[in-house]
Amino acid sequence: MFRGFAAKQTHRYGKDTTMPETVRTSTEGTKRRGRRKKPGPQERYLKIQQEAYYCAEKDGFRKDPVAYWLEAEAEAGM
């Protein structure tokens, strides 16, 4: 009987001994805990933009937009 590369082979005790198609490395598929990914420039800009708008809305749009932007940057702490 021909047993090709993809043929299922079993051990004499019934254990499957075929090799998996892909072998996972030790770090692949694991989550990094404790470290956050630093946001990119576009994500940072959008977050500050949204926070500046919320600060201005809360204040009634009384100040200069640049003041709201600087306040939002300080709150973001990035």
Image (spheres, rainbow, N blue to C red):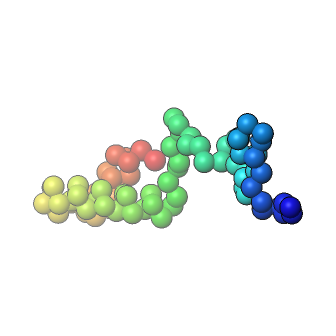
Task: Work out which residue is located at the far right of the displayed protein and give it.
Answer: 2
Q: Residue at x 75, y 46 (%)?
A: 10
* Number of marks drawn: 0
- Decide: is 77 above or below 41: above
Residue 15 x/y as whole percent: 71, 41
* Residue 13 on image: x %, y %: 73, 36
Q: Residue furthest left?
A: 60
Q: Is residue 13 left or right of residue 36?
A: right
Compare residues 15 and 46 and report the one nearer the observer: 15
* Front residue (pair 77, 20): 20
Residue at 77% x, 60% y is: 7
x and y, in percent, of residue 21 in the image: 73, 57
Q: As drawn, is 34 to the left or to the right of 19?
A: left
Find the residue positioned furthest to the front.
1
39 above or below 77?
below
x and y percent of residue 41 in the render? 51, 61
Quick check: can you spot residue 17? yes
Quadrant of the snapshot with the N terminus = bottom right
Report the side of 78 relative to 23 (left or right): left
Q: Residue at x 52, y 49 (%)?
A: 38
Q: Residue at x 17, y 60 (%)?
A: 57
